[in-house]
Amino acid sequence: MGFKLIPTLVSVAITLIIWLLIPIPQGVTANAWLLFAMFIGVIAAIIGKAMPIGAISIIAIALVAVTRVTSDNPADAIKDALSGFALPLIWLIGISIMISKGLQKTGLGARLGYYFIAVWGKRTIGIGYSMALSELILAPVTPSNTARGGGIIHPIVRSIATSFDSDPAKGTEGKIGKYLALVNYHSNPITSAMFITATAPNPLIVQLIADATDMQISLSWTTWALAMVLPGIVALAVMPLVLYFMYPPEIKKTPDAAQFARDRLIEMGPISRDEMIMLFVFGVLLVLWAGIPAMILGDIWSLDPTTTAFIGLSLLLLTGVLTWEDVLTHKSAWDTITWFAALVMMATFLNKLGLIAWFSSALQASIEQMGLSWVPASMFLLLSYMYAHYIFASTTAHITAMFSAFYIAGIAVGAPPMYFALMMAAASSIMMTLTHYATGTSPIIYGSGYTTLVEWWKAGFVMSVINMLIFIVLGGIWWKILGYW
C-alpha cells in the first residue's frame, strides 16, 4: 500500500466526523464546513505521517476539485485547486532551496563553518559561537532549515566532537558533544526567524498575514530582516551562554579544535571556482533582496524577491555550478513547491469562504468574556499558539492550521497589527525549540545521541521562554523605533 493504514483511517474518520456528525455552526456555509473538515483531515494525515506530505497534498488538490467547495463550475474548481502554484512566494522558497544545494555541492557551507572555528575555536564556547555565526551567514539563502542545521552544520559538529573523543557510544558525550549539539540545534530556530528565506514556512506566514489584513500588511524581505535582526542577534548571543550554564562541557579549552579546522581547510584546498561563483551569487541575492539597487538608482531597479531567486538560480545554471540534472533531482525543492501550493490554497479558500473569520470571532468572544486588555489578551493568544507546537510534528501543519485564526483574533482584541504579525512570525520559528520532533532538523541532531530526551525538552522549554522574552521586549522596542507600530 502507498499509505499507512492506521493514520489514514484516523484522518478519514476525523474528516467524516467533522463533516457529517458535527452540526454546521451558525454563520458558516456548507461548503466552508466541508473544506474545513477536509483541511483538518489533511493536517491529521500530515501529523500522523499517513503518506509523504507531497502525496497528501496531491490528494488534497484532487478533493478540493472533486467536491467543488470553491466553485460549482468544474473548470473553475480545478483552477482554484491549482491556484497555489501561481503564487510567487511558493516559487521563492522552492527556487531558494534549489540554490542552497550549491552550498553543499561546492563545499562553501562547510568551508565557512571550518573558517570560523579556525578563528574562534580555542575554547568550547568559541566553537559554539562559530556554529551560531555559521548558521546566521547561511540562513538568508538556505530556506531548508533542516539542510542548514542538519546537513551542513551538524556533520561539522560531529567531526569536532569525535576529534575530542566525545562519543555517545562510549558514554563521553558530556565532554563537548552535548553542548555543541544543543548549540547547533538552538541556533536553527533563531536564524529561521530572522529572514523570510531562512525556513520554508516563512513565505506562508507572509501570505497569511497579507490575506488577513486585505494586503494592508505585506511583509517584504527587507522589512522582515530589519525587524528581526536586532532581537535575533541578541538571542544568538545569549543562547550559547545559557546552554553553557545549563549543560557545561567537561572540556572548556579546545586549542586542538582550531588546528583541526585549519587541517580540514587545508584538505579542502584553495577556494574553488565554483565556491567563488557561489559566494558571488550569495552576495547578489542579498543585495537584490535588500532592495539596494532600487534605493540607489530608483524604483525602476526594484525586483520582486521571487524574480531575484530566479536570477540567482539562472546564474548558477549558466556558470555550471548547478546543472539542470541537479535541479530536476532536488526532490525536497519540488516536494516543497507541491505541498506549499496545496496547503496555501486550502488556507486561502478557508479565509475566502469565511471560516477563518468565524473561528477568529469565536476566539475573540471567549477572550472578551475574560475582560482582558489587548496586552494580556494578545500574549495569551501568542503563547497558546506557540506552545500548541507540543502536539505538532510539522511547523507548516501548525502554521497552516492555527496562524490565521489566532492572528485575526489578536488584532480583534486590540493588538497593533504589525507588532502582532511580527511576534506571531517570530513565534512560528521559536516554537521549533520545544521538542525532538518539532522540525526536520531536530530528529537529525537528537538522533545523534548526544542528549537525553529530558535534557532536550528542558533546554527547549528554557530557550523558548528566553527567546520569546527577547523578541517580545527588545523586539517590541526595536519595532517601535522603526515606526512599525
Image (cartoon, grey):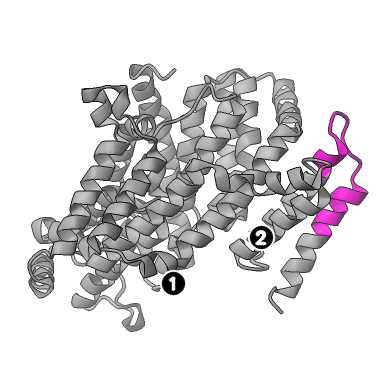
The residues colored magenta run: 13-33
Q: Is residue 390 visible?
A: yes
Residue 416 placement (x, y as % from top left): 52, 19
Q: Residue at x 71, y 23 (%)?
A: 370
Residue 256 placement (x, y as % from top left): 9, 70
Please give the residue where the numbered disc 1 appears in the rendered image. 447
Q: Residue at x 65, y 68 (%)?
A: 51
Q: Residue at x 75, y 24 (%)?
A: 365
Side of 94 where 394 appears, left or right: right
Side of 263 where 9 appears, left or right: right
Q: Is residue 193 visible?
A: no
Q: Residue at x 46, y 60 (%)?
A: 333
Please give the residue where the numbered disc 2 appears in the rendered image. 58
User: How far is disc 2 from disc 1 in space, using C-alphas?
Assistant: 30 Å
Q: Locate residue 474: give its quadrant.
A: top left
Task: Classify 317 as above or below 216.
Answer: below
Residue 357 placement (x, y as % from top left): 72, 29
Residue 307 placement (x, y as % from top left): 38, 41
Type of amino acid at the residue the image marks with label 2: Ile
Q: Is 23 covered by the magenta stretch?
A: yes
